[in-house]
Image (cartoon, rainbow, N blue to C red):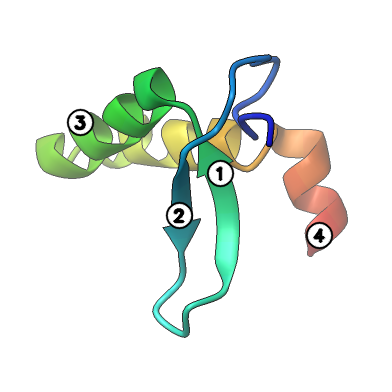
Amino acid sequence: MQCTWKDCKNTACYPQKRKDGVVWANLCEEHNKALEDAVTDRNAKKLLGAWVKASGGAKKLAGKM
């Protein structure tokens, strides 16, 4: 399975799940760390940017809404 991070071609091995258990993204090791770092930093701009990229980018995310 391919990483869902915008423009990433790496193999995903870290599923990201919502509280209800539904997978919303699958990330490679590099991007899983980037998302975890954004959560740890508690910086809203960085966290929202990582969430959008992990979801495949703004266009893909908007299409899901």
Question: Reading the chain from its start, which is encountered first: label 1 or label 2?
Answer: 2
- Left or right of 37? Residue 12 is right
According to the image, label 3 marks what residue? 37
Q: Which mark is residue 26?
A: 1
Q: Could you give the CA–CA distance between mark 1 and mark 4, rounded to whole angstroms?
A: 16 Å
Bin the neighbour count of mark 2 within 10 Å (Cα to Cα): few under 14, some 14-19, many 20 and up. Answer: some
According to the image, label 2 marks what residue? 16
According to the image, label 4 marks what residue? 64
Question: Reading the chain from its start, which is encountered first: label 3 or label 2?
Answer: 2
Classify 39 as above or below 41. below
The amino acid marked with disc number 4 is Lys
Q: Could you give the CA–CA distance between mark 1 and mark 2, rounded to whole angstroms?
A: 6 Å
- Left or right of 62? Residue 55 is left
**Mark 3, mark 2: which one is toward the viewer?**
2
The amino acid marked with disc number 2 is Gln
**Mark 2, mark 4: which one is toward the viewer?**
2
Q: Are marks 1 and 3 in contact (CB under 8 Å)?
A: no
At a point 48% along the width and 51% down the height, the residue shown is 15
Q: Are marks 1 and 2 in contact (CB under 8 Å)?
A: yes
Question: Which of the 4 image quarters holds residue 36?
Answer: top left
**Mark 1, mark 4: which one is toward the viewer?**
1
Secondary structure of the residue carrying tag 4 is: helix
At a point 81% along the width and 42% down the height, the residue shown is 60
Residue 29 image point, x, y percent = 37, 25
